[in-house]
Image (cartoon, rainbow, N blue to C red):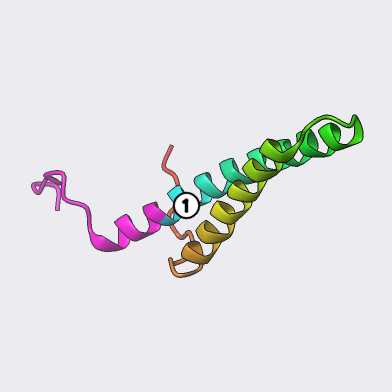
Amino acid sequence: MAGRQNRGEVRSTHRRVRSGEDFDIIIGFLGFWALILLAVTVWMEMTAQPALGWALGLLATLLALYGMLRLRRRLPGRTATRRR
């Protein structure tokens, strides 16, 4: 094994685990923005300012988050560990 080099080839199991980690990052990103948009929408409603655009942005973010969560369930759990 010492004489063989990896020529940029990735086994399919590593690729699937990696894609699951990428989904987790996207889900976290969408969750963060959903919380921000929720706070802004509530603030706009409390101060009697137009909040329709913020609410529609929140709806779009929540729908994207829901879709990502459904897609993430189909992927395997994270099993890879990081090397130092």
Which quadrant would the C terminus be assigned to in this image? top left
In this view, which residue lies farthest toward the left? 3
Which residues fall within the magenta stretch?
1-19
Across and down, in percent, residue 30 comes to: 59, 44
Name the residue type under label 1.
Phe
Q: In this view, does 42 lie to the left or right of 19?
A: right
Identify the residue at image location x=14%, y=53%.
1
Residue in front for this viewpoint, 12 or 43: 43
Identify the residue at image location x=69%, y=37%.
54
Across and down, in percent, residue 75 comes to: 43, 66
Identify the residue at image location x=9%, y=49%.
4
In this view, which residue lies farthest toward the bottom? 74
Q: Is residue 32 left or right of residue 50?
A: left
Across and down, in percent, residue 50 comes to: 78, 32
* Secondary structure state at the residue bearing disc 1: helix
Residue of label 1: 23
**14 within the magenta span:** yes
Q: In this view, does 24 lie to the left or right of 10?
A: right
Residue in front for this viewpoint, 13 or 71: 71
Residue in front for this viewpoint, 28 or 65: 65
Across and down, in percent, residue 27 comes to: 56, 49
Residue 7, placed above or below residue 14 = above
Identify the residue at image location x=83%, y=39%.
42
**68 within the magenta span:** no
Classify 10 Å Cα crowding around label 1: few (below 14), some (14-19), many (20 and above).
Answer: some
Q: In this view, does 69 lie to the left or right of 33?
A: left
